[in-house]
């Protein structure tokens, strides 16, 4: 992938983190703020290189932690693990299928907060944990399942609108007949 594609992903991650922090309409409606970074990580790990995955995990995790109550850097490792696992198995995944995208988005959006919670418990922090956590996990997972195919559609549209397609044909045709003579 090109550097422009990586830039699109990182700018989208920055805007997604900003949107989550600035606009709390979804949080007031369902009681949970949906995290869009796992959905972006699924997209980046299936359609971009490992450099984009690492940059998204580090920068996205730090941006998310700087605007949340998390200790700085705790979201980086879960995002990186999710991206690395999906990137390692991306040849086996049907990345163009909407159902596969939704399932991966559901799993990534469920795994990221669980791994973050485990990291918080192992580092002797005391996060808020109770029965409401199950509701938050369910809503965040469902939101990630919906957001992941939207990410694929958005970046597909962005790619078609701003990036020139590669030329696939040459001017030479093997079945062309050249007439010579007078």
Image (spheres, rainbow, N blue to C red):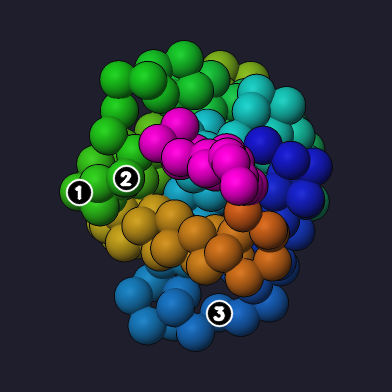
Contact, mark 3 vs mark 1 (Cβ under 8 Å): no
Q: Tell us which disc is closer to us: 3 or 1.
A: 1
Q: What stretch is highlighted in magenta?
A: 166-182
Q: Residues within 10 Å of mark 2 (few under 14, many from 20)?
A: few
- Of callouts 3 and 2, the N-terminal one: 3
At numbered mark 3, what does the secondary structure look like: helix, strand or loop? loop
Work out whether 22 lies above or below 71.
Answer: below
Residue 27, percent from left and from top = 46, 75
Q: Name the residue under label 3.
A: 24
At numbered mark 2, what does the secondary structure look like: helix, strand or loop? loop
Work out whether 153 lies above or below 121.
Answer: below
Q: Mark 1 points at which residue?
A: 99
- Separation of marks 3 and 2 at Cα, in angstroms: 32 Å
Residue 170, percent from left and from top = 60, 41
Q: Tell us which disc is closer to us: 3 or 2.
A: 2
In the image, is 24 to the left or to the right of 152? right
- Separation of marks 2 and 1 at Cα, in angstroms: 9 Å
Residue 51, percent from left and from top = 73, 26
- Separation of marks 3 and 1 at Cα, in angstroms: 28 Å
Q: Which quarter of the rendered picture does the N terminus lie within? A: top right
Residue plotted at (61% across, 80% down): 23
Contact, mark 3 vs mark 2 (Cβ under 8 Å): no
């Amino acid at each position: 992938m090109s550097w422009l594609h990586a830039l699109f992903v990182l700018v989208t991650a920055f805007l997604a983190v900003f949107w989550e922090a600035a606009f709390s309409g979804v949080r007031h409606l369902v009681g949970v703020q949906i995290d869009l970074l796992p959905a972006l990580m699924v997209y980046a790990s299936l359609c971009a290189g490992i450099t984009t995955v690492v940059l998204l995990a580090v920068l996205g995790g730090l941006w998310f932690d700087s605007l949340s109550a998390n200790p700085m850097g705790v979201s980086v490792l879960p995002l990186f693990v999710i991206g690395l696992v999906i990137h390692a198995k991306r040849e086996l995944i049907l990345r163009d299928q909407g159902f596969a995208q939704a399932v991966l988005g559901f799993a990534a959006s469920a795994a990221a907060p669980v791994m973050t919670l485990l990291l918080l418990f192992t580092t002797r922090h005391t996060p808020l944990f109770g029965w409401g956590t199950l509701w938050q996990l369910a809503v965040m997972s469902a939101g990630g399942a919906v957001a992941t195919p939207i990410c694929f559609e958005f970046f597909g549209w962005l790619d078609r609108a701003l990036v020139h397609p590669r030329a696939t044909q040459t001017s030479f045709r093997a079945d062309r007949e050249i007439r010579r003579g007078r």
